[in-house]
Amino acid sequence: MAAGLRGPLLTTFAILFALLAVSNLLKPFQLGGETTGFVFLGQRMSGLWNAVLGPLFGIYLAVYAWGIIRMRRFAMRMGLIYALYVVLNLVLWNVRSDDPFEIGVVLGVVYFVVAIGVSAGAAVISRGVRTSSREFAAACVGDRARRSCISTRRARGTGRRSR
């Protein structure tokens, strides 16, 4: 039921965040070599900080991805926080780095657009889904839930009135 309301784009974002979580959980192992490390506030971490911050952000992103998949309310807030962090991190990376576009200007711009687009896009879409999630109440169970479902429909003018 949540998958239909979530939609394919938000589902894709959740999968991407889950993959990013795995990537961050693996940062301490430096599988990509010495230049692999978690970037926190524009600085590539190494040593103890890399071993602590990478997995912490991995856990954060895993919880966020789970929240999107399960359509939990907290996922929207986590998404907004993460989107702000991504923007701040990218700006600080470009300010602090000697060669901010070490992968090339075109790929750097594409990375910038995708990173901000996915993080902010997921937050915005989940906010929109949350506001339309009143329709989720159509599967009301129990008297108390059914009454709140009916009153919500009346307020929106979408339900039948009971006599």
Image (tube, rainbow, N blue to C red):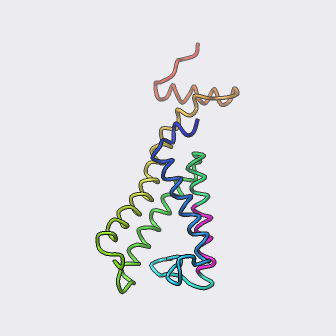
Q: Look at the image and tell me in which quarter the N terminus lies.
A: top right
Q: Residue furthest top?
A: 163
On screen, residue 31 above or below 58: below
Q: Quadrant of the C terminus?
A: top right
Q: Is residue 76 magenta?
A: no
| Nearer to me, 74 or 100 | 100
Q: Is residue 139 above or below residue 162?
A: below
What span is in magenta? 50-61
Instruction: Establish if 13 lies above or below 153.
Output: below
Give the image location of residue 155, x and y in percent.
49, 29
List the single residue furthest toward the right. 142
Does 54 lie within the magenta span?
Answer: yes
Counting from the top left corner in percent of width and height, residue 101 is at 34, 77
Q: For residue 48, which quarter of the picture?
A: bottom right
Residue depicted at 57% across the width and 63% down the height: 21
Residue at 40 percent across and 72 percent down: it is: 90
Q: Main secondary structure of the magenta part?
A: helix
| In the foreground, 132 or 45 | 45
Return the x and y of residue 124 as percentages of the image width and height: 43, 51
